[in-house]
Image (cartoon, rainbow, N blue to C red):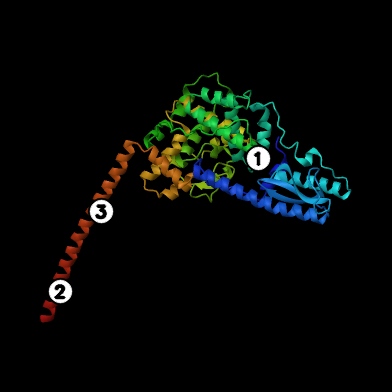
Amino acid sequence: MLEKELQESFGDFTPPASTDGSYLGTQIQMKATRYHLEQKFENDLVDVKSRLKAGKVKVGLVVVGGTIQLQASLPLKPEDTDLKGTRSKQYKISLNIPANLDGLKTAEEEAQELGKLIARKQFEWTDKYLGKTANKVDSQPKTIGEILEEFETEYFKTHKLTEKSKHTFSYYTSYLKRLVGIDTILTQVAIDKKIAELNNEYARYSAIKSLKVLKSTLNLTSFTLEGIKNTQPKSQHRDIPSDEDVVKYYQLFEKYALSRRSTIKKDCLQSWKMWQWVYGMLATYGLRPRELFVNPEISWWFNPENKDNTWKVHPDTKTGYREALPLHPEWVDLFDLKNLECLELLNIQVSGKTSFTDINTIRVNCSSWFRRVDIPFTPYDLRHAWAIRAHIMGVPIKAAADNLGHSVEIHTEIYQKWFSLENRKKVIKLAVDKKDNVEALKEENEQLKAEIKQLRETLAKYQIAEVLS
C-alpha cells in the first residue's frame, strides 16, 4: 500500500482540470506536475543543505546528471598520488541516488553517515564509496506481477494521489495484467512475443502504452519499445440518437420493469426508476456517467436557490468541478428529474462508495442496464448527442465545451466526428431558413421605407396647402 509520506510533496498542489483525455490536456497536466515537483525539489534541496551546514556536517550535496552526489574532502583514493602532500582531496561520490524528492531523503541520510565517519576519522574507501557495487544488477529478470507493487510506489512519487490519478493508474495495471500477463518476464524476447500475439488494435495500443509507462517509471533497461509504432486506433462507429429517439427510448425502462420475471428480489423491484433517472440526466446535461455517482450534491439539486436547475459536478471527477446546465430545460420536467424517490435510490446506490473501483462498478452497471432494456446506444452516446444538439442549436462552442467539462478542441472533434447526414441536413435547412428570413426582413424593411417616404411626401403637401390657405 501507498505510504502517506509519499504524497506530502503534493499537499499544496492541485493538478489543472484541463483534459478530457486529449493529448494537449494530458501534456498540460504533466507539465504542471513536473514543474511543481522540480520547484519542490529545489526548495527541499536548499533546506537539506542548510540542515547539513547547521549540523556542521562536512559533506555537501551536488546534482549531476540526474543524480544527487556527495561532495567532501576525503583521504586520497588508493590509486591517487599525493602531488601536493595534503594527503586529501575534494571528491564527488556517486551512490546512484536519483535527483528526486525521495532520493533527497536518502542523500541526506548518506551525507550524515559519511559526515560521522569523517568526524571520527574512520573513513575508508570501501566498495560502496568507490562505486564498485553501484552498478550491480539482478541477473534474474522479474515478472510483471513481481514489480506491480514497486510500480505503484514509484508512480505516485510523481503523481498526486487523486481519484483521477488512481483511475488512470488502475487502467495501466489492468492492461498489464490482462494483456501482457503477470507471469510475463520483463525481457526483450518475452515482451516482443506478447505484443506480437495481440491482434486487436485496441489491445495492442493499450498494452504498449502501459508498458511504456512501466518502463519509464521504473527506469527498466531489460527491454526496449523503440521502433514500435503505437498509433491510437480510430474510434468505432456510433449511433448518435436524435432528440426524438432520446424521448422514445426513455420509456423502455418502465416497459422492461412491467415485463420482467416476478422472481426478482424485492429490494431490486424499483431499481429501474433510478436507472431511468440516470438516462434522463445524461441526455439533459451531457454528463459523463461517473459525474452522477461521485459524491452527488442531492441537497443542491433540490435547493430552491437552484433556479437554473444546475447539476454540480464534484471536483474529484475527470475534469474537476463545474455546474452543468440543461440544453432542453423542459426535459427536467419531461424526464421527472426532480423525482425524490429516484434521488433516494441514487443516494442508496452511492452511499459509502468513493473509491475508483466502487464508482467504476456502478458505471459498468449503468451500461449493462442500457443493454438490458434494449436501448440501441451507450450512455456516452447521450453525451455526444448533447454536443451535436448544442451545435445545431447555435450554442457557442466555448459555452458548450465548458458545460460538458472538456476543451474546445475535444468538443469540435466530437461533433465533427459524429455529425451525421441527417444532422447536416438540419443545420443547412436552418441556415437556409434563416437566410430566407433575413431576405424577407430586408424586403419588408424596404417596403416600410417606401411607405414612410410616401407618408412624408403626403404630409409635406398638406403642410404646404395649409400655409397657402
Three-letter amino acid code of the residue under disc 1:
Phe
Q: What amino acid type should be assigned to the residue bearing mark 3? A: Val
Task: Give the mark nearer the N terminus: 3 vs 1.
Answer: 1
Q: Between residue 418 and residue 220, name the one nearer to us.
A: 220
| SS of the residue under disc 3 | helix
**The N terminus appears in which quarter of the rendering?**
top right
Front tag of 1 and 2:
1
- Is residue 95 toward the left or the right of residue 38 in the image? right
Q: CA distance from mark 3 to mark 1?
A: 59 Å
- Return the x and y of residue 280 as percentages of the image width and height: 47, 37
- Residue drawn at x 63%, y 50% is 36
Q: Amino acid at mark 2?
A: Ala
Disc marking residue 460 = 2
Residue indicated by mark 1: 156
Q: Can you say whether 235 is above or below 443 in the image?
A: above
Q: Where 457 falls versus 109 (above or below)? A: below
Residue tagged 3: 438
> Dividing the picture into quarters, in which one does residue 103 lie?
top right
Secondary structure at numbered mark 1: loop
Q: Badge 2: how crowded within 10 Å, few (<14), some, or many (20+)?
A: few
Q: CA distance from mark 2 to mark 3?
A: 33 Å
